[in-house]
Image (cartoon, grey):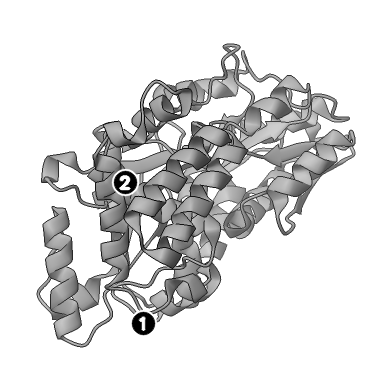
Amino acid sequence: MKRKIIALLLSVVALSAFAQGTKAKIEFFQQKVEATGTYGALIEAFQKANPGITIVQNTVPDPGTVIVTRMSSGDTPEIFSDYPTQMSFRPKVSAGNIRKLTGQSFLSRVNPALLEMSRLPDGNFYALPISQNFGGIYYHRDIFAKYGITIPRTYADLIAACKKLRANGVTPFIFPDKSLGQLEHSYLISSGSIYPNFLKDLRKVKSGEKKLSDFPRFRRVAEVFLELRTYGSGDSLAVSYPASAESFANKSAAMTILGSYAFTTMKKANPDAQIAMFPFPGEKAEDTMALAGIDAAVCVSANGKYQKEDMAFLEFLSRPENAQIFADLDLTPSCITGVVNKNKDIDEVVTIINKGKVTEWIKGVFDAPVVQAHDNAVQALLLHKNIDKFLREYESAIIDN
């Protein structure tokens, strides 16, 4: 399949103006490890069309920390992926590390609503959005079919499904709560539908405008979070994301709650698994939301050596035929207009996103210290399972950071 896609890519691209004589070796610091193969296919096609340009993809452990360290020492990668809707992106721009892309013609290919999402407070764009990310509940179609379970449309339906699975000897959920990032995602995915104003009201708590006790739905979010763990595979705080993804792919549980980044990982672990996703259901069906935003996005150093070649690579990535291949390989919806979502396993979530029923990622709302405090408080909730204590600690953590 992958070979056919690459062959198609190579057949539709033409040699660019850089084909004659240009010699450039450019680092592409790529932060989304799950997309390494996807970018690799596009890089291969770009280099075939531009033989004078070599793109070297670089992926490292803890890339978010590494890129900040490199930028602070004046070593900004020539081209790099980043997350323009996250608060952590803004200091990189204000420090002068990222080239402004406002006015670049290839941005016209981006879905206007998603492009607007990436606009910074100064009114400019500093990244090319390529794919969307989202979160929801992964499930095994065949397990649901075997026990006559339909996609839950309400939270009560979800609990009923859990009870039916357990009654038949099937573990309903596996949770990778040892991994703080995935713990955060799970909390946000559930809170978005249980309490759609979750982050909006949390802002009011942070500003001192309101107290956490003014919003009783915060308690309900915590109750749901703990209740679901009673249908898990055991001590979720001992389960890491990589282990859980592989375990779930091989049917250790019927469901798991993760972001879209996990799809390719699980498919690799078990290519025959009939895995699909549905949005976390609200207490009422009409309350159901999807946690979504911009995922893959590519930026250029403000002081790069090969600015013209850098722009050529971004223009190449923005072409609908190339963005289609990215979407097909990455199994995620595209930010580029005209690209068709062929991954029918995520249709349930994409339908909600297309209706505009979307909640934000917390990293797009609060700075890193607040996010870290939020995550630590949620993990502590799983340890002591005391909601009153959690709400007190949670409020202090949000206000004090």
Q: Amino acid at mark 1?
A: Ser
Of the numbered discs in the image, which one, if any, rests on residue 191? 2
Q: From the viewer's side, name the closer residue of 300 and 21.
A: 300
- Quadrant that contains the C terminus: top right
Q: Residues within 10 Å of mark 2 (few under 14, many from 20)?
A: many
At which x and y percent is residue 222?
Answer: 31, 52
Residue placed at 44% from the left, 39% from the top?
395
At which x and y percent is residue 186?
Answer: 39, 55
Spatial CA span between label 2 and label 1: 25 Å
Of the numbered discs in the image, which one, if any, rests on residue 252? 1
Does 390 appear above or below 355? below
The answer to whether residue 312 is left or right of residue 24 is left
Q: From the viewer's side, name the closer residue of 190 and 223.
A: 223
Which image quadrant is residue 394 in?
top left
Which image quadrant is residue 74 in?
top right
Does 272 appear above or below 275? below
Q: From the viewer's side, name the closer residue of 362 and 265.
A: 362
Q: Amino acid at mark 2?
A: Ser
